[in-house]
Amino acid sequence: MTKDLRENRLKARIRVIADFYHKKGRMPSFSEIGDMVGMKSKNAVYKLVNKLEKLKVLERDDKGRLIPVSIASSVKMLGTVEAGFPSPAEEELSDTLSLDDLLVKNPQATFLLKVSGYSMSEAGILPGDMVIVDKGQSPKNGDIVIAEVDGEWTMKYLDKSGDSVTLMPANPKFKPIKPKKELKIAGVVTAVVRKYR
Amino acid sequence: MDTNPLTISSWPKAILHLDADAFFASCEQAIHPELKGRPVITGKERGIVSAASYEAKAKGVKRGMRLFEVKKACPDAVIVPSDYETYSLFSVRMFEILRRFSPDVEEYSIDEAFVDVTGLRRSFHGSYGIIAGKMQEAVEKELGITVSIGVSLTKVLAKIGSKHKKPNGLTLIPGREIHLYLEKLPVEKIWGIGPNTSAFLGKFGIKTALEFARKDERFIQKHLSKPYQEIWHELNGRSICPVISESKSSYQSISKAKTFTPPSKDKAFIFAQLSKNLENACIKARRYKLAATRLIVFLRTQDFRDSGIEIKLSRPTAYPVYLFQPLKEGFSHVFQPDNLYRQTGVVLSGLMPDAEVQRSLFDDNSKMEKMAKIYTTIDVLSEKFGKYTVHHAASLATKIQAQHEGERGDIPQRVTGLFKGENKRQRLGFPVLHIKV
């Protein structure tokens, strides 16, 4: 079999899996992939999955279930160019991300927030900006977090050292906050978006 | 009464029912964290309670209560307008989270789901209780709302489980323990058994769910129709109703009703409301390629009295132009000039697939084809530019006069505080946290 034919067959298989994913909203199981692409042996499917994993078409989580990578993107990766030069996107198969993928890691746990104050201005976050807040990630030292301190809501750097936690503003005109009674972290700020026009 | 279990196998199947606690109010508390722990009520724009948080329920606030009654019962209640866009986003996310656990998720309503978790104990290295607990945790961590879960052998039993303890409850009913949960449960509390059936069962001395479940099959077959026989099987731990993971593709009936404030006596305005509901219902019917054979028209007065009428249509249709005549007749039957009305509604029922509609000899076929073209175009335009871009003149009054008197604060915050690039019709598909930082 020539290289072209092999490539075409692989692309067709990726398309089948992508279609399944977009229709059902989940990745197929190994046996479902076998049914769709006409492979009877699970081992053959396993090899195909390995190949697709290398091409960053999909991924496996720690339990071995499939996670879509490039096929989850709304940008179409695999066109059907009939003649002429293959488009660069096809050659690379999938090395682009949509802005959504870039900005949102956990789509089910992501919220938006409109900034109103200046306490993080030196970090480049200004009133009117949109920040993207992820409730799914656990906060680490140095993260910008949305937190409730003794009943007041704030956005600050999280500064953990040993047992003590301080919320640090990025604007020197604001004071660091040390929680007296209670600190609840509502989410981690993962990005700021400012649209000009 | 004997105390034998109804079935001895513990988990031949595992069906989970999840019910979000005071869903709309919980969503509001999740995006307005300062409202956590306070009595929150949604439905400001309608003048009645759509949902009440548990803090408000504790003070006696109930669904459907009028807002001035709420202010008496619970003066510190925070009353907000409904923000269905945000609730839908939460709902979709909740179902997505459930699908991480099992592909068999039935979206039963905006805040309820059934999940078939049979056989998942191995992959999650834990009991069904642990799986349910993980779901509860994931929803609470990522969405900030609590849910109540019941796990049992059948849908009917799972639903009993999720109601057993609320809010944030988790109830497991294995086969051997079913009878313990049915013992004290009145028969009318069973999912699918209404006041008529429970009264009927009462005539045979059946008062509790357990008494019903223990009746022998011959009695059940003799006296009850198929849906109730199925409930009887399900109560006995035999799963009859499967979890249907496909999204809804067909309807028995489609109803559209809208409240307007202030209440009105204006005949033209009230008819326009009705006409808008009709157009709305028809849009939905066309989306599912259905045609109605019956039309129900109803009006609700300011003091919550309903009057309605059902009209049989001469030909099944989903085109308002053929429905205006019956709508007008129905309306003039029901409408009384002295009444103040607050809500109108239409129901399209007796739905059948559009493709199966038979045309009669006397139909004007060319006109019907023309109408099909017109409405297809209207549907395309609506999709592109928003609903009601093109509408019937009869609905015009609803465009000129606002649905609700413009008291500020009746519009959800999501629509007033837009981000740059968003507009009245299209917004980013993420819920917005309303925190001042």
Image: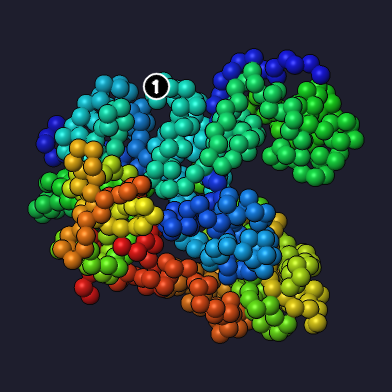
Q: Nearer the viewer, residue B180 or B94?
A: B180
Residue pictured at 57% horizontal, 33% vertical: B150
Residue pictured at 65% horizontal, 56% vertical: B61
Callout 1 environment at 10 Å: few (<14), some (14 to 19), or many (20+)?
few
Q: Is residue A37 left or right of residue B400?
A: left
Residue furthest to the front in view is A180
Q: Is residue B251 left or right of residue A194?
A: right
Number of numbered callouts drawn: 1
Res B359 seen here: no
Residue furthest to the right in view is B203
According to the picture, the residue beneath numbered tag 1 turns out to be B125
Quadrant location, the C terminus of chain A: bottom left
Amino acid type at image mark 1: His
Q: Is residue B277 left or right of residue A167?
A: right
Residue furthest to the left in view is A85
Residue pictured at 67% horizontal, 17% vertical: B7
Residue pictured at 35% horizontal, 42% vertical: A21
- Across and down, in percent, residue B112 comes to 55, 45
- Across and down, in percent, residue B403 comes to 58, 76
Res B219 seen here: yes
- Across and down, in percent, residue A70 comes to 23, 45
- The answer to whether residue B33 is above or below residue B385 is above
